[in-house]
Image: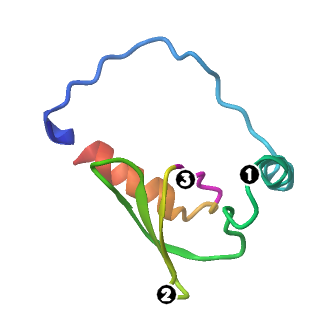
């Protein structure tokens, strides 16, 4: 089933959004995630959802990775947000 064919139903959210300082989020993630898994100070240029699961990420410096989870802390001009938003309106 493609994303366009899916039906979305409004339900009460289980979790509330919460703002957090970027430095605190980074410190919490670094404390729990294996070394080398977190990419800091990198410019994301492309995020493509993989149908089988995960996401393909391409960075400005030419590095490409496949990730199980992407946390978009890339600011106001977020490539992560724009990639998600395009999927939602397509």
* Disc 2 element: loop
Q: Residue most toward the top?
A: 12
* Separation of residues labelled 2 and 1 (CA atoms): 24 Å
Q: Is residue 72 magenta?
A: yes
The answer to which image quadrant residue 72 occupies is bottom right
- Mark 3 is surrounded, within 10 Å at the Cα level, by few (under 14), some (14 to 19) or many (20 or more) other residues, namely some
* Disc 1 element: loop
Residue range highlighted in magenta: 69-73
Which marked residue is nearer to the observer: mark 1 or mark 3? 1
* Separation of residues labelled 1 and 3 (CA atoms): 13 Å
Residue 39, x across and y down, in percent? 67, 68
Compared across the picture, whether 7 is left or right of 36 comes to left
Compared across the picture, whether 44 is left or right of 49 comes to right
Q: Which residue is drawn at 38% across and 49% down?
A: 85
Compared across the picture, whether 9 is left or right of 80 comes to left
Q: In this view, does 14 lie above or below 46?
A: above
Tag of residue 70:
3
Q: Give the mark nearest the N terminus, 2 or 1.
A: 1
Magenta stretch, main secondary structure class: loop
Q: Check if mark 2's residue and mark 3's residue have beta carbons within 8 Å.
A: no
Residue tagged by mark 2?
62
Image quarter where the N terminus lies is top left
Residue 67, x across and y down, in percent? 50, 58
Residue tagged by mark 1?
33
Q: Which residue is drawn at 86% across and 53% down?
A: 27
The answer to which image quadrant residue 11 occupies is top left
Q: Residue most toward the bottom?
A: 61
Q: Is residue 25 above or below residue 83?
A: above
- Mark 1 is surrounded, within 10 Å at the Cα level, by few (under 14), some (14 to 19) or many (20 or more) other residues, namely few
Q: Which of 6 and 90 is in front in this view?
A: 6
* Disc 3 element: loop
């Amino acid at each position: 089933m493609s994303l366009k064919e899916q039906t979305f139903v409004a339900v009460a959210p289980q979790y509330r959004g919460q703002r957090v300082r970027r430095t605190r989020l980074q410190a919490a993630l670094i404390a729990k995630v294996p070394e080398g898994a977190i990419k800091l100070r990198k410019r994301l240029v492309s995020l493509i959802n993989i149908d089988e699961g995960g996401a393909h990420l391409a960075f400005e410096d030419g590095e490409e990775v496949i990730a199980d989870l992407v946390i978009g802390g890339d600011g106001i001009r977020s490539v992560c947000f724009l990639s998600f938003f395009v999927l939602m309106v397509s």
